[in-house]
Image (cartoon, grey):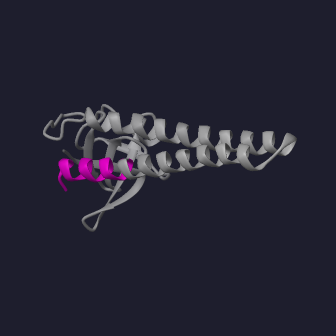
Amino acid sequence: MEKSTVLQHLKSLLEERMRVAWDAMEAAQESANDQGKSSMGDKYETSRSMGQLDRNMHARQFEQTRQERLILERVNPGEKSQRVAVGSLLETTAGWFFVAVSLGSVKINEETVLAVSSSSPVGASLLGKEVGNKFDFMKKQHEILSLH
């Protein structure tokens, strides 16, 4: 499993999420604007407020995804360290892990990679560990086999 392949796959996933959030944000804004043309009084204000809340929710999702994308942009695919850090791809007895952003279980070329944030419980427990070190995951102890 190549770190550059994992990075590219995760970036494309985040780009798709950003596009979906942006489209939903624009649709919610249009809907809120259209309410002003077709409604009157309290019903208009309620509908417009609901549309604005939807727009804001999608805007937050877009911004959160954009921030995750920026984290991936800072990862050097050619960098290999002796200790787990943000941007590390590691093979363990529990499978493949990529420590950077929390995207969960991702299938890449018939392999499953668990993309975890460095601030998640498992991500935090992996930081600073080396090949051969043990860590707890899903109430079992596992070992780091290799770092990429």
Residue at image location 56% in from the left, 43% down from the top: 58
Residue at image location 66% in from the left, 39% down from the top: 52
Residue 60: image location, x then y, percent: 54, 37
Secondary structure mainly formed by the magenta segment: helix
Up-down: is 112 above or below 125? Answer: below
Up-down: is 112 above or below 20? Answer: below
Pick the quarter of the image with the N terminus. bottom left
Residue 34: image location, x then y, percent: 67, 48
Residue at image location 17% in from the left, 41% down from the top: 77
| 36 and 123: which is toward the camera | 36
Determine which quarter of the picture holds residue 133: top left
Pick the quarter of the image with the C terminus. top left
Q: Residue furthest front?
A: 37
| 139 and 49: which is toward the camera | 49
| 133 and 119: which is toward the camera | 119
Q: How many marks?
A: 0
Give the extent of the magenta segment.
1-14
Q: Residue furthest bottom?
A: 110
Residue 105: image location, x then y, percent: 41, 57
Residue at image location 79% in from the left, 43% down from the top: 44
In this image, 80 relative to 23: left or right?
left
Residue 53: image location, x then y, percent: 67, 40
Q: Residue furthest right?
A: 42
Residue 136 located within the stretch drawn in magenta: no
| 98 and 30: which is toward the camera | 30
